[in-house]
Image: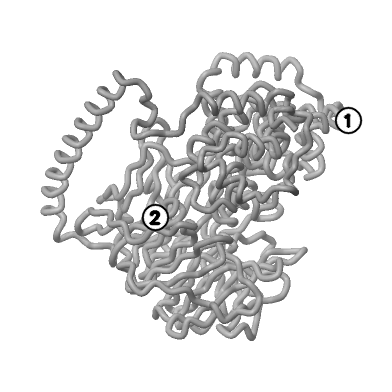
């Protein structure tokens, strides 16, 4: 562990609150509403000519649009040439599903095309592609309270878990499909408590399971019989497992002196659960794995702070993020290493991981370099091939989190 | 009651909020002004918590209101008005912080000198007031994102779930980022007192 990872100062919550809470006399100054009223009276709603209210500017705007169309045509021609050269490359195991705002789209690596699938008036949250790629699920509002499943092409859209007596509300995590596409697990709020919703996809019936205090961040065992989840009590946050019906709950990291984030992947032979945790005494985060049967924990990273392990579908490689402090700021990069923690090496700087493609060929990465467009990349674990799936001029944090490629991700 | 009178009491109880939002969407400036009037202190305090500057908080609040007015017809569900308004404000504050960082490189260096000069001793830190002052100085040096997460949680008392809704992130991500922001605050504090 580097000295930069040591927690240098122990501040109490109360001390921070006392220092930063605005005084009681911090109120909107007199005249604020009047200024707003005057401003909106002189600020017309956006017209066909956004940000271009004057006639002369419209001409420039039209010229700009024309140039944009020409650039798009050029890009299409170049794209067609590239697509021709990519036909033999891996497809990633089917499309990547990305939701931005209220639109769900699919990105096909074979054609390099982004296809809109569905628009939901109340927004789209917690997108999860099934392992085979046949289905996709998401939450939508108002609430957002409704869990929806449909075919990957947008047909047969239907709400599931309608049989629940108590309302289950999406808790903001990442939903996970079982490896056989039969079940979905989702973290939900029920009567003010975080619990796990398990949905049988064929019947559409939902079942709320988990201990009565708190359960979130579920993942499936490879045989779909068990669910691992983060179990939080007043004293500790651990990883626990339970059967699909909620029985036989058992903590598996209770002996670890660390605050776990949650289970990230369960190895395909059923032996290991990979996760990250913040060590209580050292105050740094590391990647770990725990043997589910024996509760033996192995620490896999020992250097700078590391988190968000994503195990490849073949169980051989872990992609994770590593944090370093350069004296001014915390830098975040994506690294890969062997499943036993061996041979860590840099994959993408200034980046965050979104897990693996379901065929294990690519790591999905969001790269954010200051002054450059934010890019969603598919990168082979050896770094030899980088494919740009999306390029955005701006993408405020947290950026491109509503993504699923059919493999559980941190 | 004049809608422009800042001392006037809100009349939320007499009007259906959704109707007000729908009216504002249709172009009713009075309805929109009333919506803002009811929320002005909450908006301003949240902006102030993040920016810690009267003028910037005022600008952020005003900019947010104008942006929301212009884009209001795009809001499909009137019940989500508050969430959308607060989210727009938080994003505006973060943008202002980033712009502030870009445009005040020299000032940052000068500020470092002043921090050096006014560096509180370990003994002084034992005093609550000095500690609070040091925390505020450290907070001012944080990145835009770190400031936002710290301000929302500690100054505004927003829960993890509320912050997740405000910034549009999973709760796990918010927990991690908040933890990282707090560590940055503590590191900055350590640097000041070194």
Q: Residues within 10 Å of mark 1 (few under 14, many from 20)?
A: few
Give me the disc on residue A103: 2
Describe the element under mark 1 as helix, strand or loop.
loop
Q: Give the image quarter of residue A315.
A: bottom left
Q: Is residue B178 above or below residue A270?
A: above
Q: Is residue B190 visible?
A: no
Describe the element under mark 2 as helix, strand or loop.
strand
Q: Residue at x 38, y 67 (%)?
A: A406
Residue A370: % across, % down? 42, 32
Q: Residue at x 39, y 67 (%)?
A: A129
Residue placed under numbered mark 1 in the picture: B127
Residue B90: % across, % down? 59, 38
Give me the disc on residue A51: none
Q: Chain of mark 1?
A: B
Q: Is residue A50 above or below residue A199?
A: above
Q: Nearer the viewer, residue B82 or A231?
A: B82
Left or right placement of residue B169 versus residue B115 in this view: left
Left or right placement of residue A151 versus residue B149 in this view: left
Q: Nearer the viewer, residue B52 or A138?
A: A138
Q: Give the image quarter of residue B150.
A: top right
Left or right placement of residue A20 versus residue A103 in this view: right
């Amino acid at each position: 562990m580097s000295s930069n990872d040591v927690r240098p100062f122990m501040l109490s919550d109360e001390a921070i609150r006392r220092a930063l809470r605005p005084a009681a006399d911090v109120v909107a100054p007199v005249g604020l509403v009047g200024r707003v009223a005057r401003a909106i009276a002189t600020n017309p709603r956006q017209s066909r000519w956004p940000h271009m209210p004057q006639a002369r500017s419209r001409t420039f705007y039209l010229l700009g649009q024309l140039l944009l169309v020409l650039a798009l045509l050029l890009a299409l021609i170049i794209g067609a040439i590239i697509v021709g050269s990519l036909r033999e490359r891996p497809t990633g195991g089917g499309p990547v599903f990305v939701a931005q705002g209220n639109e769900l789209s699919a990105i096909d690596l074979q054609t390099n095309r982004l296809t809109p699938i569905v628009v939901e008036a109340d927004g789209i949250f917690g997108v999860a592609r099934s392992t085979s790629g046949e289905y996709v699920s998401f939450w939508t509002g108002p609430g957002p309270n409704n869990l929806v499943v449909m075919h990957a092409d947008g047909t047969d859209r239907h709400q599931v878990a309608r049989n629940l007596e108590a309302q289950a509300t999406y808790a903001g995590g990442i939903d996970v499909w079982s490896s056989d596409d039969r079940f979905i697990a989702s973290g939900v709020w029920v009567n003010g408590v975080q619990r796990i919703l398990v949905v049988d996809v064929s019947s559409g019936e939902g079942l709320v399971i988990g201990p009565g205090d708190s359960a979130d961040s579920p993942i499936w065992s490879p045989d779909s019989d068990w669910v691992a989840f983060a179990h939080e009590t007043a004293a500790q946050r651990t990883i626990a497992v339970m059967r699909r019906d909620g029985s036989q709950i058992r903590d598996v990291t209770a002996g670890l002196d660390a605050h776990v984030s949650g289970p990230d992947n369960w190895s395909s032979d059923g032996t290991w659960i990979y996760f990250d945790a913040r060590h209580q005494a050292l105050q740094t985060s590391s990647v770990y794995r725990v043997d589910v049967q024996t509760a033996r924990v192995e620490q896999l990273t020992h250097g700078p702070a590391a988190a968000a392990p994503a195990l490849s579908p073949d169980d051989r490689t872990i992609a994770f993020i590593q944090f370093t402090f350069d004296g001014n700021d915390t830098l975040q990069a994506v690294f890969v290493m062997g499943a036993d923690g061996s041979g860590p090496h840099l994959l993408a700087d200034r980046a965050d991981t979104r897990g693996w493609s379901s065929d294990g060929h690519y790591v999905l990465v969001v790269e954010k370099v200051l002054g450059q467009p934010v890019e969603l990349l598919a990168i082979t674990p050896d770094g030899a091939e980088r494919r740009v799936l999306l390029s955005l001029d701006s993408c405020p944090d947290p950026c491109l989190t509503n993504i699923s490629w059919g493999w559980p991700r941190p | 009651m004049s809608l422009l009178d800042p001392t006037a009491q809100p009349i939320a109880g007499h009007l259906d909020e959704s109707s007000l939002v729908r009216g504002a969407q249709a172009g009713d400036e009075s309805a929109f002004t009333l919506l803002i009037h009811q929320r002005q202190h909450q908006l301003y305090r949240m902006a102030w918590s993040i920016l810690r500057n009267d003028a910037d908080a005022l600008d952020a609040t005003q900019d947010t209101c104008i942006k929301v007015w212009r884009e209001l017809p795009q809001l499909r569900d009137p019940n989500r008005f508050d969430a959308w308004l607060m989210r727009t404000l938080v994003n505006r504050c973060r943008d202002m912080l980033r712009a502030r960082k870009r445009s005040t490189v020299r000032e940052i260096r000068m500020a470092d000198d002043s921090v050096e000069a006014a560096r509180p001793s370990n003994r002084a830190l034992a005093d609550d007031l000095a500690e609070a002052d040091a925390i505020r100085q450290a907070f001012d040096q944080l990145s835009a994102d770190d400031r936002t997460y710290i301000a929302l949680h500690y100054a505004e008392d927003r829960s993890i779930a509320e912050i997740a809704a405000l910034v549009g992130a999973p709760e796990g991500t918010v927990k991690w980022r908040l933890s990282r922001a707090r560590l940055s605050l503590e590191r900055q504090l350590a640097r000041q007192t070194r």
